[in-house]
Image (spheres, coloured by chain):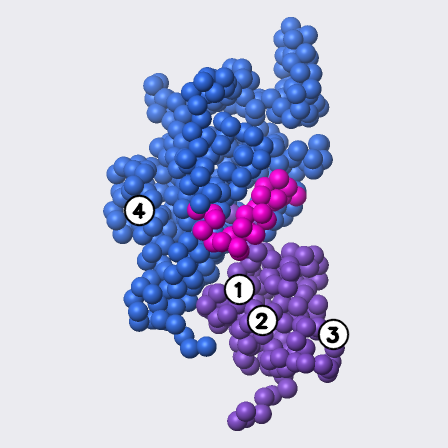
Amino acid sequence: MPPKPCALCLKSRAMIKRPKTGQQICRDCFYYVFETEVHNTITEAKLFKPGDKVAIGASGGKDSTVLAYVMKTLNERYQYGLELFLLSIDEGITGYRDDSLETVKRNQQQYDMPLKILSYDELYGWTMDAIVSRIGRKNNCTFCGVFRRQALDRGAAMLNVDHIVTGHNADDIAETVLMNIMRGDIARLGRCTSICTEGEDTIRRSKPFKYAYEKEIVMYAYFKKLDYFSTECIYSPDAYRGHARAFLKDLEAARPSAIIDIIHSGEAFEVKEEIKATQKVQQTCQRCGYMSSNTLCKACTLLEGLERGMANAGITDRGTKQLLQVQQSEVTAPENLRTIPFFNKPFAASGSVDSPIIIESTS
Amino acid sequence: MASQTPPNISLKIEFSGGLELLFSNQRSHKISIPSEVPKDNNTRLSPPDGSTKPADISYLVYYLRDHLLQERGELFEEDGTVRPGILVLVNDTDWELEGEGDYVLKDGDEIVFISTLHGG
């Protein structure tokens, strides 16, 4: 088969077929269009302003590794004026996260960015290894997901950054749209496609790869020989997401534009005001100050369940009810229960520095 | 045909993105396969009887599944091709530009399989 010329520069040999457009392009044009599309996503959504301090949620996996590389490239090329940090969460999973954190530490040097690692152990007093040995493998993904979300915000607060960016790509978002439809989760369906989320009490969080296909991210990493880590979590992957993912990959094989089409459909959903009114209002957790839809946030509920040996609290309605009954029967809570430190968002009015920034040293 | 086809072709195979875990946790493999293979991609008949075709990637997928893969074949091969979500490169070029499974392998080709399904 004779080599085909690139559809953009018409000179070099085409090496990749873009799933989004079907265009056949060469390596250099691919780098250019991939980076430029991310730049356009960033500028059209007005994600940053000069001087912003931005933490890149870094797991050592392909998406966040490519994100760190591309953010650094664009920040220099277009003079965003951003101060970039790497922020990693150590869930405490031996043989998985410890290996991937080694990758992040290499990225820290390769990209010359400060790195902060915050561990579940430090924040919650429990590693995922300890949680799994207590509760088994069922539901452990719930703990991990709830704990990670909060840990990222708290790590970002320690770094005193304005903004967190994560490596969620178009495939991830399309999967989430499908999952929220299948679960009938109207509240999440309404917000899962937004490029940037910001609550009153949380740090801005956005997804510059919202429109970037996983295939292109992986090809980019391969061609650029970026150093990333890829192993499945040893505590069984999120099975429900796995089904959505396999289904989406089948759709993509039949019609590559399916991914972007699903995102556009998700964006077009509008939740009626009267439905929104029936949804729980956001409040702050009485115990830890993090945003919550109940008096006690999900992480505090899960943690208390672990501490009391009632691991179903926060998982099943029955478990949560049992915890409430125990709480009500006590005059004062037992003193030995570990709790999460109170959450102060950055730039609190007091201006006090309650947690010094500790940057991992380059060794 | 001008020159005689050699009976075997050598290939360099690489697995990454987590796929290597299915192949003895080894990323790079050197293999040698027949240049003419059964049309039905049966990799266990040697020498092939019945009708043959030049070895292509479709055959290679079966070959790797039957002879190199150590566990969980369903994570690699599905319905006669690689599982959706696995990228294939032929000498660093997206296989979608090379005819995918119909690409006829040449001696010395380097074929890379990358899983995109592992966590980001």
Q: How much space separates mark 1 and mark 2, taking CA atoms?
A: 10 Å
Q: State which chain disc 3 sits on.
A: B
Which residue carries the number 2 mark? B57
The verdict on a common chain for dots 3 and 2 is yes
Tag 4, which secondary structure? helix
Q: Amino acid at mark 1?
A: Val
Prevailing secondary structure of the magenta residues: helix
Vertical arrangement, residue A214 with respect to residue A157, above or below: below
Which residue carries the number 3 mark? B44
Residue A199 in the image, given as x and y percentages of width and height: 41, 25
The residue stretch that appears in magenta: A236-260
Q: State which chain disc 4 sits on.
A: A
The verdict on a common chain for dots 4 and 3 is no
Whether the residues at callouts 4 and 2 have beta carbons within 8 Å, the answer is no
Residue A136 in the image, given as x and y percentages of width and height: 72, 35
Q: Amino acid at mark 2?
A: Ile
For disc 3, the neighbor class at 10 Å (few under 14, some 14 to 19, many from 20) is few
The verdict on a common chain for dots 1 and 4 is no
Q: State which chain disc 1 sits on.
A: B
Whether the residues at callouts 1 and 4 have beta carbons within 8 Å, the answer is no
Residue A3 in the image, given as x and y percentages of width and height: 41, 75
Q: Amino acid at mark 3?
A: Arg
Q: How much space separates mark 4 and mark 2, taking CA atoms?
A: 37 Å
x 31%, y 71%: residue: A11
Q: Between residues A303 and A316, which one lies in front from this camera angle? A: A316
Whether the residues at callouts 3 and 2 have beta carbons within 8 Å, the answer is no
Which residue carries the number 1 mark? B88
